[in-house]
């Protein structure tokens, strides 16, 4: 289990042990901070070296904020939710393929996205200076919509990864899933307004209910390759991802993200 806070990770480990009765060494807590590329690289190096196999990699980490801040060379949500998420994916895909070959199985790479991506109009897609240059300009940033936009970028990238490596010729299933609005710590709970607390009480899923989509997606078959999953089934993503415009935007996002990943670690995109 990869966590930014070891203390919270140990709390989660104890909760798992108490609820399942598993042995103490069943769950390991490892440090991973997606706001740091070095942390991502160190985690991936350890995982590839120490774990005998990886059958499922669920990338669930994310941040949501309306405040502008930087992490590495991007606005924080772009770094954590997008760039580092796929940096980790690329770094561990060789281990997933190795697992497939050695154990005659089909591992899953699952990116946790959000149904909030349906709400984005993505006006930045046509920015003459480039998508990420526009998104990294604090004078142009629409921070109220930045989190859902980061989730839309994930949708584009997963779809293109699957297009580049079709299921019938690739040993790993790459999909994405929506746990829905869950009453978790994302965005902070202590600072919620009274209205927000009422909204969460009335509409939010419990973390256990939301996790069902994660478990389903991490064990689903090749028919889910490149697909957006919700309610334990394949769903259609936002219309902005469809048609010629959607495909062109998808390729532009793909090209820009890959260029950023190559700057972080030259040659990494060959890992796909």
Image (tube, grey):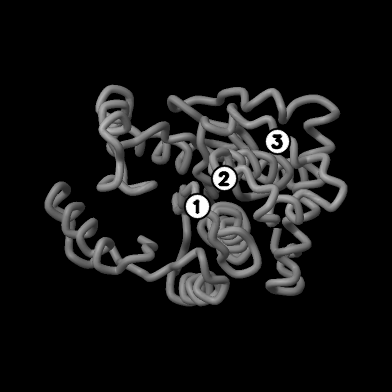
**Is disc 1 placed on a helix, strand or loop?**
loop
Residue with the mark numbered 1: 67
Report the front residue among 76 and 246.
Answer: 76
Horizontal side, residue 226 vs residue 210: left or right: right
Q: Which mark is residue 260?
A: none
Residue with the mark numbered 2: 143
Residue with the mark numbered 3: 122
Horizontal side, residue 146 vs residue 57: left or right: right
Mark 1 to mark 2 CA distance (whole Å): 7 Å
Specify which label sits upstream in the sequence, 2 or 3.
Answer: 3
Report the front residue among 149 and 179.
Answer: 149
Q: Nearer the viewer, mark 3 or mark 1?
A: 1
Residue 195 location (% of width, % of height): 30, 29
Residue 165 location (% of width, % of height): 74, 47
Q: Is residue 111 above or below residue 44?
A: above
**Is disc 3 placed on a helix, strand or loop?**
loop
Dot 1 and dot 2 residues touching (CB under 8 Å): yes
Residue at coordinates 78% horizontally, 62% vertically from top-left? 259
Residue 35 location (% of width, % of height): 51, 65
Q: Is residue 168 visible?
A: no
**Is disc 2 placed on a helix, strand or loop?**
helix
Residue at coordinates 29% horizontally, 69% vertically from top-left? 6
Residue 105 location (% of width, % of height): 52, 50
Mark 2 to mark 3 CA distance (whole Å): 13 Å
């Amino acid at each position: 289990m990869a966590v930014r806070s070891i203390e919270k990770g140990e709390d989660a480990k104890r909760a798992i042990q108490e609820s399942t009765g598993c042995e103490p060494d069943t769950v390991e807590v490892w440090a991973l901070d997606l706001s740091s590329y070095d942390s991502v690289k160190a985690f991936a190096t350890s995982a590839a070296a120490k774990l005998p196999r990886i059958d499922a990699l669920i990338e669930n980490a994310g941040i949501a904020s309306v405040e502008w801040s930087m992490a590495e060379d991007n606005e924080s949500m772009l770094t954590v939710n997008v760039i580092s998420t796929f940096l980790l994916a690329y770094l561990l895909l060789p281990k997933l393929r190795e697992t497939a070959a050695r154990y005659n199985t089909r591992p899953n790479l699952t990116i946790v996205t959000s149904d909030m991506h349906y709400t984005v109009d993505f006006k930045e897609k046509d920015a003459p200076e480039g998508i990420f240059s526009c998104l990294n300009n604090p004078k142009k940033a629409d921070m109220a919509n930045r989190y859902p936009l980061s989730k839309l970028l994930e949708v584009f990238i997963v779809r293109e990864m699957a297009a580049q490596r079709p299921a019938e010729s690739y040993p790993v299933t790459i999909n994405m899933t929506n746990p829905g609005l869950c009453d978790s710590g994302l965005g902070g709970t202590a600072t919620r307004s009274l209205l927000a607390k009422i909204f969460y009480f009335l509409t939010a899923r419990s973390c256990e209910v939301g996790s069902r989509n994660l478990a389903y997606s991490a064990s689903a078959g090749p028919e889910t390759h490149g697909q957006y999953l919700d309610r334990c089934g394949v769903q259609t993503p936002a219309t902005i991802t469809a048609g010629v415009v959607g495909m062109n935007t998808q390729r532009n996002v793909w090209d820009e993200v890959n260029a950023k990943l190559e700057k972080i670690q030259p040659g990494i995109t060959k890992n796909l």
